[in-house]
């Protein structure tokens, strides 16, 4: 049965997902660039980026669910932090987040065909993760973009983890610098749709869970680690609960 499942997955990827994904990437990236150079990068992100992601989700034949959206003020800027399980997270965030935001992403993405150029024109934030000083400078210079309801999005683990990894401090330092609340988000189930380090796709069910924003008043650089750990624990809670339910009694 496993071999049959893998064969179906490969056929799906090569003859359905990749062709549609490639066409959507070219068309939506081009639309995003046109809107961006016309002086409307936020519109390019909300229309072209969201449509690209939703087409990609549709082509995985998966169900997505958003919980807790009522906790968000659409006019408030946030520093958004989320766990990172799978490539599918990119589609889930862009397609279902429903907020204007700038994504903090590794600089290698800047050189991806079509996607990289579009992300650059949409003013997403590229950082060199191998150079801490350069990354900090990039974040500082990008802070002026985070205002008037535009948020900034981080995967504070820095890369994909099957289980939630330790959070880096960059997102939380930016929250202090900009005096913005932290918005913790948990992604559940995406690793079963597109497993880590795999090109297989298995239709599934992924959740995007919004938690109550964290007021940063009272936090400083001296107790920044407390803010980091609090955010980590909030993001982790649904994953712990899911794992406990999955354990046999």
Image (cartoon, helix red, strand yellow):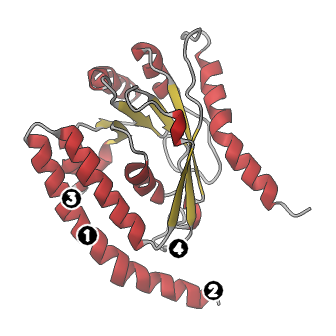
State the image coordinates of residue 89 (x, y, percent, origin top left). 47, 54
State the image coordinates of residue 118 (x, y, percent, origin top left). 20, 49
User: Which badge, 2 or 4, is on the more N-terminal residue?
Assistant: 2
Q: Identify the secondary structure beneath mark 2.
A: helix
The quadrant of the image that shows the N terminus is bottom right
User: Which label was assigned to residue 22?
Assistant: 1
How busy is the neighbourhood of tag 3: few (under 14 within 10 Å), some, or many (20 plus)?
many
- For label 2, the residue is 2
Q: Identify the secondary structure beneath mark 1.
A: helix
The quadrant of the image that shows the C terminus is bottom right
Q: Residue at the spot x=56%, y=69% of the render? A: 204
Q: Quote the CA–CA distance across marks 1 and 2.
A: 28 Å
Of discs 3 and 1, which sits in the foreground?
3
- For label 4, the residue is 203
State the image coordinates of residue 141 (x, y, percent, origin top left). 27, 21
Mark 2 and 4 residues: CB-CB less than 8 Å, in contact? no
How busy is the neighbourhood of tag 2: few (under 14 within 10 Å), some, or many (20 plus)?
few
State the image coordinates of residue 21 (x, y, percent, origin top left). 30, 69
Q: Is residue 122 visible?
A: no
Mark 1 and 2 residues: CB-CB less than 8 Å, in contact? no
Query: Who is closer to the viewer here, 63 or 175?
Result: 63
Q: Residue furthest right?
A: 249
User: Which label was assigned to residue 28?
Assistant: 3
Q: Hey, which quadrant is residue 248 in on the image? A: bottom right
Of discs 1 and 4, which sits in the foreground?
4
Q: Residue at the spot x=74%, y=47% of the render? A: 240
């Amino acid at each position: 049965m496993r071999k049959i499942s893998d064969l179906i997955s490969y056929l799906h990827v090569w003859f359905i997902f990749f062709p549609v994904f490639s066409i959507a990437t070219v068309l939506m990236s081009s639309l995003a660039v046109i809107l961006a150079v016309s002086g409307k990068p936020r519109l390019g992100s909300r229309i072209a980026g969201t449509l690209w992601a939703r087409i990609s989700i549709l082509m995985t034949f998966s169900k997505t669910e958003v919980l807790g959206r009522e906790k968000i003020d659409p006019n408030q800027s946030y520093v958004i932090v989320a766990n990172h399980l799978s490539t599918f997270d990119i589609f889930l965030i862009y397609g279902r987040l429903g907020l204007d935001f700038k994504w903090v992403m590794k600089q290698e993405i800047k050189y991806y065909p079509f996607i990289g150029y579009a992300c650059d024109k949409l003013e997403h934030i590229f950082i060199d993760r191998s150079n801490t000083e350069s990354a900090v400078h990039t974040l500082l210079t990008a802070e002026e973009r985070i205002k008037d309801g535009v948020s900034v999005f981080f995967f504070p683990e820095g890369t994909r983890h099957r289980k939630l990894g330790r959070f880096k401090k960059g997102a939380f330092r930016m929250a202090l610098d900009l005096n913005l609340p932290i918005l913790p988000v948990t992604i559940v189930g995406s690793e079963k749709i597109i497993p880590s380090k795999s090109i297989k796709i298995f239709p599934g069910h992924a959740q995007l869970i919004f938690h109550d924003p964290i007021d940063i008043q009272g936090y400083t650089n001296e107790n920044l680690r407390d803010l980091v750990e609090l955010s980590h624990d909030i993001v982790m809670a649904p994953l712990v609960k899911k794992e406990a339910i999955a354990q046999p009694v």
